[in-house]
Amino acid sequence: MLPAEEIKAHLDIVEVLREYIQLKPAGANFQALCPFHNEKSPSFLVSAEKQIWHCFGCGKGGDVIKFVMEKESLTFPEALRLLAPKAGIELQQYSRKESSFKTRILDCLEEAANFYHRMLEDGPNSSIARDYLEKRGLSDEVIEDWKIGFSPDSWDDLINHLKSKGYSEREIEGAGLVSRGQGGSRFYNRFRRRVMFPICDAGGQVVAFTARLLPGGDDKMGKYINSPATIVYDKSKMLFGLDKAKTAIHAAGEAVIVEGQMDCITAHQFGFKNVVASSGTALGPEQFALLNRYTENVVLALDADQAGQAAAERAGEMMAADSQQLVESADRWGRLKMFIDPSRSQGKNIKIVEVPLGKDPDDAIRQNIDAWRQALLEAKSLAGFLFDRSIKGLDLGKVEGKKQAVARFLPVLDRLESPVEKDYWLKKLALAVNVETTFLNEALAKINRPSQKTGLKAPAAPVSMHQPLSREEVLSERLLSLVLKFNAYVKYISDYIDTDQLGGIANQALYSKLIIYYNEARNTQGDRLEIFALDYAKFKEWLLGRESEREAAVLDKLSILAEKEFFNYDTARADQEIKMIARELKTIFLNKRRREISSLISQSDVSGRPEEQESLLRELAILNEELRRLITL
């Protein structure tokens, strides 16, 4: 069995996709809002039986590997690499010639993580790192689970080790593990005498490191340093611990964001598994887009100092801003269009935690876990947090204090989308500053939105990503879907419907292949073929074996359509629907052909050729007779 087929055989597409999107049961299938285009009603369907997915909004579809390729922007080998551990399958290493540079970088980083972890266990002077971790209260199980390591005070031990494993200096540099010396001719280890925290992407692949300086080390580079930006690492698009937290986030229905790696690790050690860390970076839209896969509820628990609270305010304001952003991209026909990119949406239910006791969550959890748990329960809404900050330190008994409070909080009110929430906080502000709500409403109406202030026009409505289907195409899709579900009718439509009587080139191509497949089965089994049983998997394999990938994609789409539209049909209802659609398709085709012939007969250049005109008249008579017979059926 090929690696891709083996991986698919060991994975459940529903469970894998649940790591990215929120699936809900829909009959025999599951549905969700499509992660590849903006929509309000779910048109993304997943078939657990056939292990495929399709979006009827943007037209994308495929198997679990195709989904991961689309969602993670991966090549086929990279998607296999990501999914193989989930399936419990060990892929053979690609040769350097066959492997992409990105794959080699990921392999190199994984090997570096293993090296650092071994150095923590028995490397030179590693006791200082183990003592540090023990003082921070990390258990052996936590160290092993997070693969925490140690970089010795050496200039080239990691470089030599990676070279011995077949990695080139170019690959080691591309992984962000080394720096160049003066003159740029020699490399040396980027990380020395530091505790190493591997940073993994959502799939659990090591993409970078955060390194914490140990006592006695050279602090010229700072207490904490991170890997530089690489082909696999962009800190603005990464959340530390997401690979370990995503299942808990989905289960809890919310994600807690802390600032540092130790905050995140400590939270997990004490049972708060839905926690991720921003790794000390400013929170950005890409990081929140990552969380869109799992939840719409976010709790910001950043440090209690002024910088942490300011960061919480900035993140909250950014997430509350208008999230509909247009981007230019190609539609399914390759044409450039402007449409809403769902990955840029930051609209969420946001709360802010006031960290108790200590200055950061790590200290707070260790000093009083109950106080931390209570703080999470009492997290304030974003509006409540910003309201408190707006009036903090002001003398609301004086006119100047009232003016400052209103000036601070009105822009927050302007961003609130819920009329109920906006009315609540408007009244709360009016009560705090002791003014009439009518005054605040008038002031609120005068606030200009950012697009108006900068002179920018509001974005136009996004262009639809799908051309509307013709009547023939809709009917053809329904007919083929029904026949795929009720296989006994393959013989009926093969005798009754010609390929050119279907609408849509893709439908005609699949129908043509289906008839060939049916005739092959009939020729093989002869009289024994009493009822044709179409096996989806075998038919798809047959298509792919004839390099009919496009037809296989249409098969997936129509198979899911069948489960979506006809899951509760019995044979009698299917019989009625199939015959009705077939009759209408035939009628549409005959009428269209009759109009064409009538037009040809009326053309002057045919009138001079009696034989051709007579042939057209005979065909027209046959068409009229067929139409009369259809009407009387």
Image (spheres, helix red, strand yellow):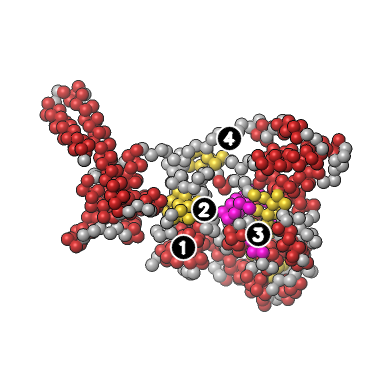
Q: Which residue is mark 1?
A: 12
Query: Tag 4 or tag 1, which sits nearer the N-term?
Result: 1
Q: Is residue 498 above or below residue 436?
A: below
For residue 459, the mark is 4
Q: Is residue 490 above or below residue 85?
A: above
Between residue 548 and residue 429, name the one nearer to us. Answer: 429
Q: Residues within 10 Å of mark 3 (few under 14, many from 20)?
A: many
Q: Which residue is mark 3?
A: 276
Query: Tag 1 or tag 3, which sits nearer the N-term?
Result: 1
Residue 454 occupies which quadrant of the picture? top right
For residue 156, the mark is none
In the current view of this chain or complex, which residue is farthest to the top? Answer: 604
Query: Tag 2 or tag 4, which sits nearer the N-term?
Result: 2
Mark 1: which secondary structure? Answer: loop
Q: Which residue is mark 2?
A: 71
> What residue range appears in magenta?
272-297
Labels 1, 4: front one? 1
Q: Residues within 10 Å of mark 4 (few under 14, many from 20)?
A: few
Label 3, label 2: how many angstroms apart (C-alpha)?
20 Å
Circles 3 and 1: CB atoms closer than 8 Å: no
Q: Residues within 10 Å of mark 2 (few under 14, many from 20)?
A: few
Amino acid at dot 2: Lys
Amino acid at dot 4: Pro
Q: Is residue 51 above or below residue 497?
A: below
